[in-house]
Image (tube, grey):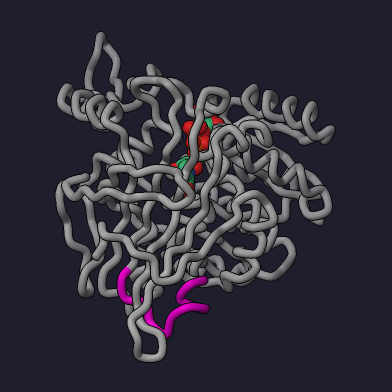
Amino acid sequence: MRKVLIIGAGGVGQVVAFKCAQLPNVFSEIVLASRTEEKCQAIAEKIKTQLQREIKTAQVDADSVAELVALIEQVQPFMIINVALPYQDLTIMDACLQTGVHYLDTANYEPLDEAKFEYKWQWAYQEKFAKAGLMALLGSGFDPGATNVFTAYVAKHYFDEIHYLDIIDVNGGDHGYPFATNFNPEINIREVTADCRHWENGEFITTPAMSEKRHFDCPEEVGDYNIYRLYHEELESLSKHFPSLKKAQFWMSFGESYLKHLEVLSNVGLTGIEPIAFQGQQIVPVQFLKALLPDPSTLGPRTHGKTCIGCYVRGVKQGKPCSVYVYNIKDHQACYAEVQSQAISYTTGVPAMIGAKLMIEGQWLKQGVWNIEQLDPDPFMEAMNQYGLPFQVIENPKFDAFE
Ligand code: NDP
């Protein structure tokens, strides 16, 4: 039983707080801190009403190591679950080192002034965390997160060597808005407009964003969707930790309306991250756009449909070619009924809770900085089944899109 400090009170923070609060025997005390404490208080209120459990709240600017250190010293948690924005990863890791506290996140560090996410900054903390006897668990969301564990799980149980990996993220949900993003709009837009990179024959190949398109027919009647190739951060760690991979790609579904709006917004410069002068002040276009768009944490009650996220892996077993598709399907309204959030926040928040639980219980606790696929996938997969994200495995499926 341990005390945990959650930082970030957005869509994902709400799910993490709810899921931790459901397990008082693991998370004996919960403190939820963020830049705007009222958002933490609103979540605490919902948890009190729904689960009859009290959680504490606090205000913190996680860009400031000094503020973080003061809060951590006051709270004295076992670990921090960082579900603020990727910009805060390094300051929170620094504060953990100064205070002797373990660390977990769901997205890798990204500098504010450059839409470039890479693990190099966080991997550089390896020695510092190991020397301090602390653990940093990187990428414990769904993608990255569950998709990395899916890959490790099938590599362990179904293959001698894995050669091809296609991560397919379909959101079949509809929130009824012409344009809205399911997680932080600024991070989402930076991600989908960045150049695409995929792993092929020992190197990353760069192509224009979303220039490759396929059709994917999801299992269990979730539907048939257009999916587009993007760069996603787990490709970097998975290609490093599974050197037998010849090709690794990431695909995401987008509807016509989303793509049309994104194209227009990009063409008029509203997705830019360079500050511009406007009426005597500097504004960053994508941050201004974020202020206009629906807050992802408010999409829960109006989002219907399902997500289907999984990994299609091909390789060899006992000299013979074989393939496996491992996936989870989650219903948006079922998530809303349980934790008052839509499925994108839910599918991110549950793996964050599971990663923290495995650290607290000692099964995953190791010194140093670890990507999630480096740890034993079995207890995580078992917990996925137990805590709301059951997975399915199809052996030797037929996917025309990838043959
Ligand atoms: P939101 O924008 O909804 O929430 C972010 C929260 O972080 C807000 O409460 C915000 O506070 C807070 N925050 C921002 N800056 C600071 C700061 N300097 N100090 C303290 N708090 C701060 O984002 P989401 O909940 O949608 O996403 C959270 C994280 O999860 C992101 O890093 C995102 O990339 C990641 N993610 C990972 C996924 C995965 O599968 N691995 C999928 C989806 C998201 P305020 O309200 O004041 O702005």
Q: Residue at x 32, y 50 (%)?
A: 216
Q: Residue at x 57, y 37 (%)?
A: 8
Rendered image quadrant of residue 250: bottom left
Q: Report whether 403 appears left or right of 80.
A: left
Residue lying farthest to the top in this orientation:
279
Task: Decide: is 30 above or below 141.
Answer: above
The quarter in which the N terminus is drawn is bottom right
The quarter in which the C terminus is drawn is bottom left
Where residue 56 appears, x then y in whole percent? 76, 34
Residue lying farthest to the bottom in this orientation:
318
Q: Residue at x 58, y 32 (%)?
A: 333
Magenta stretch? 153-164
Question: Is residue 94 at least partly visible in the picture?
Answer: no
Q: Nearer the viewer, residue 251 or 222?
A: 222
Where residue 224 appears, x then y in whole percent? 34, 44
Rendered image quadrant of residue 188: top left
Q: Report whether 79 appears left or right of 277.
A: right
Q: Nearer the viewer, residue 120 or 128?
A: 120
Q: Nearer the viewer, residue 85 or 364?
A: 364
Where residue 323 appears, x then y in whole percent? 38, 72
Rendered image quadrant of residue 18: top right
Q: Report whether 108 appears left or right of 273.
A: right
Task: Decide: is 288 above or below 152.
Answer: above
Q: Residue at x 61, y 48 (%)?
A: 350
Question: Is residue 141 at least partly visible in the picture?
Answer: yes
Q: Does the magenta-highlighted stretch encompass residue 234?
A: no
What is the count of numbered marks?
0
Where residue 87 appears, x then y in whole percent? 42, 42
